[in-house]
């Protein structure tokens, strides 16, 4: 009877070890769950970025307004006959 109880206890300890620490155990499942959440958050950010880029491409293809806006904001271009004012803030050095 002692051998049977000792064998069953040993088997229980072995199974508990595999459950908690071995490959495919709970520790690895928790690690993989955290990794999955990180990747899903990154995918959501990239999806939003792709949607914004898609909207920008469509706007650029549709007309000249988006091209003009892009040239003004990113390249500092102005139309003929316009006056460009640049305001420079004073530095607060003593």
Image (cartoon, rainbow, N blue to C red):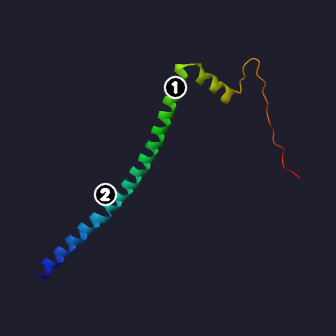
Whether pointer 1 and pointer 2 mark residues with C-beta atoms closer than 8 Å, the reply is no
The single residue placed furthest to the top in the displayed view is 80
Residue 78 in the image: state x and y as whole percent. Answer: 72, 23
- Circle 1 sits on which residue? 57
In the rendered image, the quadrant that contains the N terminus is bottom left
Residue 12 figure quarter: bottom left
The single residue placed furthest to the left in the displayed view is 1
In the image, what residue occupies the spot 31% across and 57% down? 23
Vertical comparison of 21 with 65: above or below:
below
- Circle 2 sits on which residue? 23
Q: Tell me the tag on residue 41.
A: none
Nearest to the eye among marks 1 and 2: give it: 1
Residue 31 in the image: state x and y as whole percent. Answer: 38, 57
Q: In the image, is 15 to the left or to the right of 42?
A: left
In the image, what residue occupies the spot 55% across and 19% down? 63
Separation of residues labelled 1 and 2 (CA atoms): 47 Å
Q: Nearer the viewer, residue 24 or 67?
A: 67
Q: Nearer the viewer, residue 24 or 55?
A: 55
Q: In the image, is 62 to the left or to the right of 14?
A: right
In the image, what residue occupies the spot 33% across and 57% down? 29
SS at mark 1? Answer: helix
Q: Nearer the viewer, residue 86 or 4?
A: 86
Residue 10 figure quarter: bottom left
Residue 65 in the image: state x and y as whole percent. Answer: 60, 22
Q: In the image, is 86 to the left or to the right of 39?
A: right
């Amino acid at each position: 009877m002692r051998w049977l109880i000792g064998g069953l206890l040993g088997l229980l300890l072995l199974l508990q070890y595999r459950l908690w620490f071995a490959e495919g155990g709970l520790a690895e499942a928790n690690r993989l769950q955290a990794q999955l959440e990180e990747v899903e958050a990154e995918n959501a950010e990239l999806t939003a970025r792709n949607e914004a880029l898609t909207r920008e491409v469509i706007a650029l293809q549709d007309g000249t307004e988006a091209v003009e806006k892009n040239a003004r904001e990113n390249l500092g271009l102005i139309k003929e006959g316009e006056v460009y004012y640049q305001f420079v803030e004073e530095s607060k050095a003593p």
